[in-house]
Image (cartoon, helix red, strand yellow):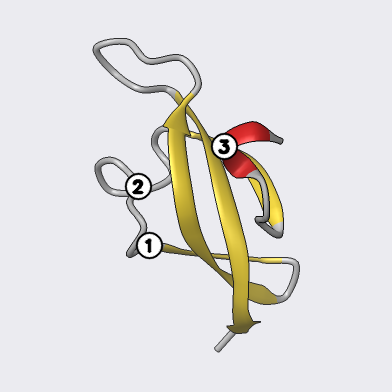
Amino acid sequence: MGIFGGEDLVVIMPGDVCEGRPDTTDKLEFQGKLWGITTIRPVAPTELDIIYKVAVKEVGDDA
């Protein structure tokens, strides 16, 4: 998986899912678990990033 090696999961997400650009302090909730973002790469970098490929690691159950 190249730059995403060693991560639990790689997620493709729309650019408007977070307020502003996502960063590694953001968390995702899905599959009944909380996931911490470890790596972010814009898939279609333009003036407005519309898609991100995000590597995540499980950090626990949803609160």
Q: Amino acid at mark 1?
A: Asp
* First reached walking from the N terminus: tag 3 or tag 1: 3
Mark on residue 22? Answer: 2
Q: Are marks 1 and 2 in contact (CB under 8 Å)?
A: yes
Furthest residue toward top: 46
Residue name at image x 41 percent, y 32 percent: 15
Determine whether 63 is above or below 28 in the image: below
Indicate the position of residue 39 as horizontal and vertical percent values. 46, 47
Which residue is tagged 3? 3
Instruction: Kindly give the residue lying farthest to the right in the view shown.
Output: 31
**Counting other residues with Cα less than 10 Å from the Cα at mark 1, is it few (<14), some (14-19), or many (20 or more)?**
few
Of 57 and 16, nearer the camera is 57
Snapshot quadrant of residue 8: bottom right
Q: Is residue 36 left or right of residue 56?
A: left
Question: Residue, x 57% and y 49% (percent of image)?
Answer: 55
Query: How far apart, in angstroms, are the residues tagged by discs 1 and 2?
Result: 6 Å
Residue on which the image places disc 1: 26
Q: Determine whether, in the image, residue 25 is placed left or right of residue 13.
A: left
In the image, 39: left or right of 19? right
Give the foreground label among 2 and 3: 3
Q: Is 49 placed above or below 21 here?
A: above
Separation (CA) of disc 2 from disc 3: 17 Å
